[in-house]
Amino acid sequence: MEAKRIDKLSSLSPGTRFRVVEISAGPGLRARLIGLGITLGAEGVVLYNGGEHIVINVRGVDIAISRGQASKIFVEIL
């Protein structure tokens, strides 16, 4: 069985598909991300990763978050 590759969401290139495996954030940011649909097990794809923001599509919705926020989200590469 192939080992899972885990990375920070902030490090992924556009077009990369992922599954959220951990959110390493305080309660406020965790609640905000969950409210946006970024939950454990959610799958998505990176649309844009440049400058200070990253744009992802999760659950059919495009979401822009800061690079700092994205660095607290750990994902499995699909």
Image (tube, rainbow, N blue to C red):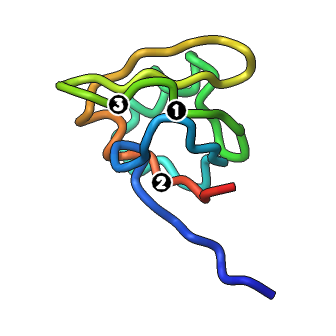
Q: Residue at x 35, y 31 (%)?
A: 49
Q: Tell me the mark number nearer the camera, choosing from 2 and 3.
A: 3
For mark 2, give the secondary structure: strand
Residue identified by numbered label 3: 49
Query: Could you give the CA–CA distance between mark 2 and mark 3, rounded to whole angstroms?
Result: 15 Å
Estimate the x, y position of residue 36 in percent, counting from the top left: 56, 17
Q: Is residue 75 above or below residue 15?
A: below
**Kind of residue sitting beneath label 2:** Phe
Q: Quadrant of residue 43?
A: top right
For mark 3, give the secondary structure: strand
Instruction: Tell me if label 3 and label 1 are in contact, CB under 8 Å.
Output: yes
Crowding around mark 3 (Cα neighbors within 10 Å: few <14, some 14 to 19, many 20+) is: many
Estimate the x, y position of residue 25 in percent, counting from the top left: 36, 43
Estimate the x, y position of residue 51 in percent, counting from the top left: 18, 25
Crowding around mark 1 (Cα neighbors within 10 Å: few <14, some 14 to 19, many 20+) is: many
Residue identified by numbered label 2: 74
For mark 1, give the secondary structure: strand
Q: Which mark is residue 65?
A: none
- Please, which residue is most extreme toward the right here? 1
Instruction: Give whichever of discs 1 and 2 has the lower sequence position.
Output: 1
Estimate the x, y position of residue 30 in percent, counting from the top left: 45, 33
Crowding around mark 2 (Cα neighbors within 10 Å: few <14, some 14 to 19, many 20+) is: many
Residue identified by numbered label 1: 46
Query: Could you give the CA–CA distance between mark 3 and mark 1, rounded to whole angstroms?
Result: 7 Å
Q: Residue at x 42, y 47 (%)?
A: 12
